[in-house]
Amino acid sequence: MKALVYHGPGLLSWDDAPHPVLEADGDVIVKITSTTICGTDLHILKGDVPEVRPGTILGHEAVGTVVEKGSGVTTVDVGDRVLVSCISSCGRCRFCKEGRYGLCTGGGGWIFGHLIDGLQAEYARVPFADTSVYNVPEELSDEQVLFLADILPTAFEVGVLAGGVEPGDTVAIVGAGPIGLAAIMTAKLLTPGTIVAIDLAERRLERARAFGADVTINNGTQDAVEAVMALTDGLGADVAIEAVGVPETFELCTELIRPGGRIANVGVHGHPATLHLEKLWIRDVTITTGLVDTNTTARLMKLIAEGRLDPLAFATHRYPLASVLEAYDTFAAAAETDALKVVLEAEPIVGDRPKRELAGVAG
Ligand SMILES: [Zn+2]
Ligand SMILES: [Zn+2]
């Protein structure tokens, strides 16, 4: 089969790779039909995630069809269309039992395209299938559910829910890239009073308004703290969601938050940020961090099926799976290409799996 293989910092290629095989009773093999690229993949490519060893197939977000299953798999069948999430759950460890799948100590957590081969490939081995994949309702397209693999639950859980957004709140979202926009979209589920989006790029702020931001602030030309204070009678935002991952944006959140407010950090940081405890301690500010658990994925899928959440606007570019390298270029140059999420599509299965591939597994 073909797969996108990481060969070390700056090096990616669309290679011939061994067809994945079942390694444990709980595994399934999935033929990928749709996959996408994440900002985290770009971090890996830069060498920021050294646990990813050269030779690893990248990707942790996909929809596909189960083509083989291990003897222990009971809730998923061959032929089922499934969402493969960025987080896997062993279902047995302490954290999985608490619904904290992101912290799984039993071999799950974020493993695809990180610790094991990922999903930007024609086929993938998916461990812990019973507790990790989601059956996709027939009426939903791949693209409607694809962003449930990462950005929607990440923004909702690590941003909106961790930030404790409540009806009427002023929610400041710093960064209007895919995660910031997903935070805007999912914050609306909790009817905040005002959603304020803050970014440096006018084009992204325009998009933030289209996604439902009530107020946008360009902090390249405006003082964001002053603008938020003006909106909140000088108090500050009830909730601030950090959706960039650089020290300046985190520190901005600590400046525009009201006393007793909540800062939810979603961005992936590569450098230390300064925590001004000398100013914050007396203001009763809560700061949360986290990796997504994906324990809201099924609920969000239901909202999509019921027409209450429409993530199709995230898909700005589409490529055939074999053009994944071109797709990476488009995604990496988002400032010029205006890309949010780049969807890679493979041909769906028609009829039975071709014999030559079965022969490949046996060989
Ligand atoms: Zn991702
Ligand atoms: Zn676990």
Image (cartoon, helix red, strand yellow):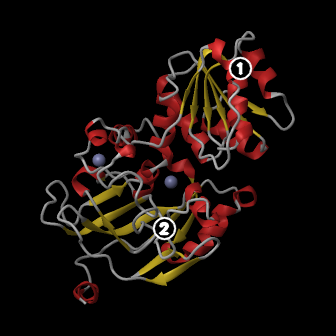
User: Which disc, if any, is residue 278?
Assistant: 1
| Mark 2 crowdedness (10 Å alpha carbons): few <14, some 14-19, many ≥20 | many
* Residue that lies at the very extreme toward the right in this rendered image: 221
Q: Nearer the viewer, mark 1 or mark 2?
A: 1
Compared with residue 163, is residue 259 higher up or lower down, i.e. above or below?
A: above
N-terminal of the pair, mark 1 or mark 2, is 2
Instruction: Identify the residue at image location x=50%, y=75%.
Output: 4
Viewer-nearest residue: 106 or 255: 106
Rate crowding at label 1 as few (under 14), some (14 to 19) or many (20 or more) other CA atoms within 10 Å: few
Left or right placement of residue 218 versus residue 5 in this view? right
Circle 1 — which element? helix
The answer, for residue 257, to whether it is visible in the render is no
Give the answer, above or below, for where 75 lies relative to 317.
above
Residue 3 pos. (x, y %): 45, 77
- Using the rendered view, name the quadrant where residue 10 is placed: bottom right
Q: Nearer the viewer, residue 363 or 54?
A: 54
Residue at point 43% right, 48% down? Answer: 148
**Disc 2 within 8 angstroms of ligand 1 (CB):** no
Look at the image and tell me in which quarter the C terminus lies.
bottom left
Query: What amino acid type is highlighted by mark number 2?
Result: Leu
Where, quadrant-wise, is the N terminus in this rendering?
bottom left
**Which disc number belongs to residue 58?**
2
Image quarter of residue 69: bottom left
Distance (Cα) linking label 1 and label 2: 42 Å
Q: Residue at x 68, y 30 (%)?
A: 275
Residue 43 visible to the viewer: yes
Asked if marks 1 and 2 touch (Cβ < 8 Å), the reply is: no
Which secondary structure, mark 2?
A: loop
